[in-house]
Amino acid sequence: MRRVPTVLIVEDEPSIAELISVNLRHSGFRPIWAMDAVTAQAELEAALPDVILLDWMLPGESGLTLAKRWRAHSRSKTVPIIMLTARGDEVDRVAGLDAGADDYIAKPFSTKELLARIRAVLRRRAPEQDVSVVTMGKLALDSATYRVTFDEQPIKLGPTEYKLLLYLMTHAERVHSRAQLLDQVWGDHVFIEERTVDVHVKRLREALGESAAAMIETVRGAGYRLTAQSAKTQSTAVA
Ligand code: CA
């Protein structure tokens, strides 16, 4: 399954943001536009993008300050940042790279060149991203961005449901008892009733929706199993 890479555009000039967005969409990316530092921070907290295009001169906090902060933060530190700026001189270029930007492009730039640079930073990050994505049928989980999708539609999960799904996807087609799931997902240092597992499996199924939920089988007297098989035969399995 091919993921559509998300590009967060942090740019206060609507005409530039629009031009970049149109070109990105045309080239198979999903652009998200944030016009200032506050919006950009909120977008980043909601979901990690694959690449950030960051304008240097923004109202309020500068792009340079944002780049430094995102690099210092464990969650966002691996997201590639390309700085966009009208400043072209050597000192600023160095300051941008020192702040943690992966690349730098001076305005005015050609969209062709910008796309080439985006693809280049994605290629450099590709080995890490490949191992972080687990797929099973139409279900995909990216442990680098905490993004879960079914048939490319995003699925919103609570932290426990996310951990449970991650464990089931990386240990698929096997039956896990409730006690095993408690050990592996919750950690054996916490005392929790086995019934808790059922509660979270129920929540996970609800969040996944009917088609994906059919992949989680209840094995009577044994526990739970995530299987790619039942999704195909769900109409008969449910009846
Ligand atoms: Ca600007």
Image: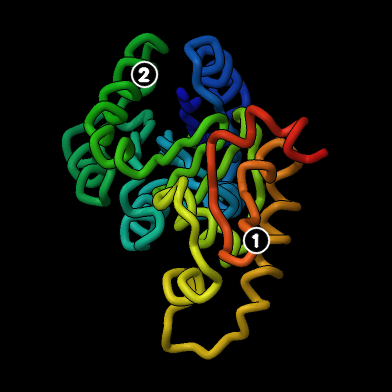
- The image's colouring method is rainbow
Q: Residue at x 74, y 43 (%)?
A: 209
* Residue 11 drawn at (x, y percent): 53, 35
The C terminus sits in image quarter: top right
Q: Residue at x 37, y 31 (%)?
A: 85
The answer to whether one can see residue 190 in this image is: yes
| The residue carrying mark 2 has its beta carbon less than 8 Å from ligand 1 | no
Assign a secondary structure to mark 2.
Answer: helix
Select label 1 or label 2 by which is in front.
1
Q: Which residue is mark 2?
A: 114
The answer to whether one can see residue 65 in this image is: no
Q: Please give left or right for residue 12 compared with residue 49 in the image.
A: right
Please tell me which of labels 1 and 2 falls first in the chain: 2
| The residue carrying mark 1 has its beta carbon less than 8 Å from ligand 1 | no
* Residue 186 drawn at (x, y percent): 49, 75
Q: Which mark is residue 67?
A: none
Q: Amino acid at mark 2?
A: Leu
Occupied quadrant, residue 93: top left
Q: Please give left or right for residue 62 compared with residue 21 in the image.
A: left
Q: Residue at x 48, y 54 (%)?
A: 168
Q: Among all residues in the image, which is located at the extreme right?
A: 239
Mark 1–mark 2 distance (CA, rounded to whole Å): 55 Å
Q: Which mark is residue 220?
A: 1
The reply to whether the C-beta atoms of the residues labelled 1 and 2 are less than 8 Å apart is: no
Q: Amino acid at mark 1?
A: Arg
Assign a secondary structure to mark 1.
Answer: loop
Occupied quadrant, residue 155: top right
* Residue 176 drawn at (x, y percent): 49, 62
Give the vertical position of 97 relative to 165 (above or below): above
> What is the crowding at mark 2: few (fewer than 14 residues within 10 Å), some, or many (at least 20)?
many
